[in-house]
Image (cartoon, rainbow, N blue to C red):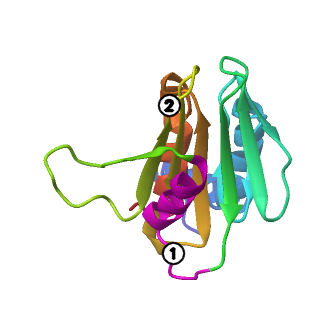
Amino acid sequence: MRRFSAFQLALLCLGASLMVSAVFLDRLVGLWHSVTEPDAVQWNGLRVVPRKHQQIRAPEASMLIVHSDRFPKARLALFTRPEDGTTPRELVKALCRQDDCEVLPRGGDGSDPDPHRATAIYDTQEPLQIVVLRPADKHIWIEFSGPPAAYADFEPLIDSLVRQLGGF
């Protein structure tokens, strides 16, 4: 019988360890995520990872709500809505007809508004804005409600969700 050289034994060990790690890689990744992101929630195929000062409340099959400790009046709602041809802009316009708010134009240069995003501004003592998003014609909608300053607090989470849904 022929003996393997040291280099061949090293390659054999490396290959065997790669095969063993490939079998257990899914479990290792799951363990890594549970340690690094303990508050993460799987919802309708999305991985929702709130920041340290945000909590997920009311995780249901059709709706998930994220609240912020920094901005108690702000919330981010994810909800499912069947495809009925309604755009976020139409939804916000209907809301503003009822509640006497202002639909914010997307571009100040007179360009067409984004069909996947709409913003309503309420002129009250405490500023309030509602942003409705529907990424890439999906059945999952995202709604932010709260002071305009709080939107930046939720923006990383919104960007993560939009990326998972395939963008605009």
Q: Looking at the magenta stretch, what is its main secondary structure?
A: helix
Magenta span includes 35:
no
Q: Quadrant of the N terminus?
A: bottom right
- Tell which circle, 2 or 1, labels the residue nearer the N-terminal end: 1
The amino acid type found where label 1 is placed reads: Thr
Horizontal and vertical percent position of residue 127: 53, 25
What is the CA distance from the residue labelled 2 to the residue labelled 1? 25 Å
Give, as a three-letter code, the residue at label 2: Asp
Judging by the rendered image, the residue that carries numbered circle 2 is 123
Q: Residue at x 70, y 41 (%)?
A: 33
Query: Secondary structure beneath disc 2?
Result: loop
Residue ID at (72%, 65%): 44
* Left or right: 36, with 18 as reference point: right
Depth check, front residue: 66 or 91: 91
- Region of the chain picked out in magenta, as a range: 83-99
Q: Which residue matches tag 1?
A: 86
Q: In the picture provided, is 14 more to the left or to the right than 62?
A: left
Q: Nearer the viewer, residue 47 or 126?
A: 126
Q: Is residue 96 magenta?
A: yes
Against 139, residue 161 (above or below) is: above
Residue drawn 19% across the image and 43% down it: 108
Which image quarter: residue 72?
top right
